[in-house]
Image (tube, rainbow, N blue to C red):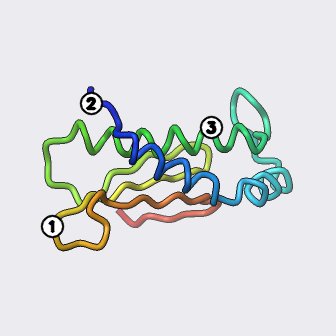
Amino acid sequence: MSEIPKHIEDKMDVLIERFDTKRMHKIMKMLDWSWYTVGVPSEEEIKKSAKERLTNSYKSYLNDDTDSDYFFSESGGIRAIYYPCKTAYEQYPDGNFELMFVAVGLDDY
């Protein structure tokens, strides 16, 4: 398995610091939304899980031999998506991430 480059790790860390874990914790507490092993997660547990989601989405990209437009990982309401750069002309040559808390969702497939 490939190592994650330091600049990508740094990019993930910045995103996690900007992610509103306080608000997510407050909403989860209000909804009594608990994770299997920890109950309602603390802000630190949310940050740890967010890092795992980001890491897993990027590792999916590293280990994939298809030409997928995105790679994602989600658990416990946290969804991380990695969009790799497809051309040298894109604004983000290292690709970009999305990190979100999904309380309600719907797919039609």
Nearer the observer, disc 1 or disc 3? Answer: 1
Residue at image coords 43%, 64%: 107
Place of residue 24 in the rendered image (x, y in percent of width and height, measured from the top left): 73, 56
- Judged by depth in the image, the label closer to the viewer, 3 or 2, is 2
Please state which of residues 54 and 34 is positioned toward the viewer in this rendering: 54
What secondary structure is found at the residue carrying circle 1? loop
For the residues bearing labels 1 and 3, Cβ distance under 8 angstroms: no
What residue sits right under mark 3 in the picture?
48
Report helix, strand or loop for mark 2. loop
- Taking the spot 33% from the left edge, 38% from the top edge, the residue there is 59
The residue located at (58%, 50%) in the rendering is: 78
Dot 3: within a 10 Å radius of its alpha carbon, few (fewer than 14), some, or many (20 or more) residues?
A: few
- Position of 11 relative to 1 (above/below): below
Near mark 2 (Cα within 10 A), the count class, few <14, some 14-19 or many ≥20, is few
Amino acid type of the residue that numbered disc 1 sits on in the rendered structure: Thr
Where is residue 96 shown, x and y percent of the image? 37, 61
Question: Which residue is label 2 attached to?
Answer: 2
Q: Quadrant of residue 34?
A: top right
Q: Earlier in the sequence, mark 1 or mark 3?
A: 3
- Which amino acid lies under the numbered mark 3 shown in the image of this protein? Lys
The mark found on residue 105 in the picture is none
Q: Mark 1 or mark 2, which is nearer the start of the sequence? A: 2
Task: Say what amino acid the circle numbered 2 marks.
Answer: Ser
Q: Quadrant of residue 103?
A: bottom right
Q: Nearer the viewer, residue 8 or 69?
A: 8
Left or right of residue 33: residue 10: left
In the foreground, 93 or 22: 93
Looking at the image, residue 11 sits to the left or right of residue 105; the answer is left
Name the N-terminal-most of marks 3 and 2: 2
Which residue is disc 1 drawn over?
87
